[in-house]
Amino acid sequence: MKTVSIAWLKSAALLLALLCMTSSLQAADKPNVAGNWTWTTKNRSGDEVKNTLKLKVDGDKITGTISGANNSEIEIKDAKLKDNELTFDVVRERNGNEFKTSYTGKVEGDTITGKIKRPGRNGGEGRSTDWKATREKAAA
């Protein structure tokens, strides 16, 4: 009886160690998206505009803001990170109407590359554009 108990304990300890190693490997595979990300786009006039996405991570929860008109910051919604794919929405309000823009991007180190899907004007067909953001280096 004593040998069965010791063998069972050794097996349980080995299983627990394997589970801990697996979960820490999975956590290491998930990219860290926290920080300030920037990219440029052209506005309707053709002028370049710097965009800033500020992301915070608390466990599995991702929150943040994106730069808006007149130096405002707009809260992002429904941010998710699955594998290396980041998704979130931005809801803007103009003249009493809400417009949702959806962002998707693949995170690789300090770069996010993906698509921005914007709604169409006056109920028209939406449009999709590419975006490539780079994480700003933290100040020393």
Image (tube, grey):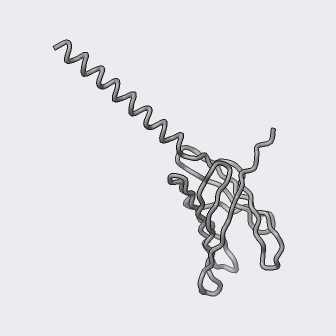
- Residue drawn 53% across and 43% down? 29
Res 113 → quadrant: bottom right
Q: Nearer the viewer, residue 131 or 79?
A: 131
Would you say 19 lies left or right of 129 here?
Answer: left
Residue that appears at 51% across and 52% down: 83
What residue do we see at 75% from left, 50% from top? 136
Q: Where is residue 84 in the image (x, y as percent from the top left)?
A: 55, 53
Assign the C terminus to one quadrant of the image.
top right
How many numbered discs, if any? 0
Q: In this view, does 138 lie above or below 6?
A: below
In the rendered view, would you say 53 is above or below 93? above
Horizontally, residue 72 falls left or right of residue 18, namely right
Seen from the viewer's position, the closer of residues 53 and 110 is: 110
Q: Quadrant of the N terminus?
A: top left
Q: Quadrant of residue 92?
A: bottom right
Q: Where residue 28 appears, x then y in whole percent? A: 54, 40
Pinpoint residue 97: horizontal percent, then vertical percent: 64, 79
Left or right of residue 72: residue 116? left
Q: Is 7 above or below relative to 97?
A: above
Which of these two is toward me, 53 or 95? 53
Q: Where is residue 2 in the image (x, y as percent from the top left)?
A: 19, 12
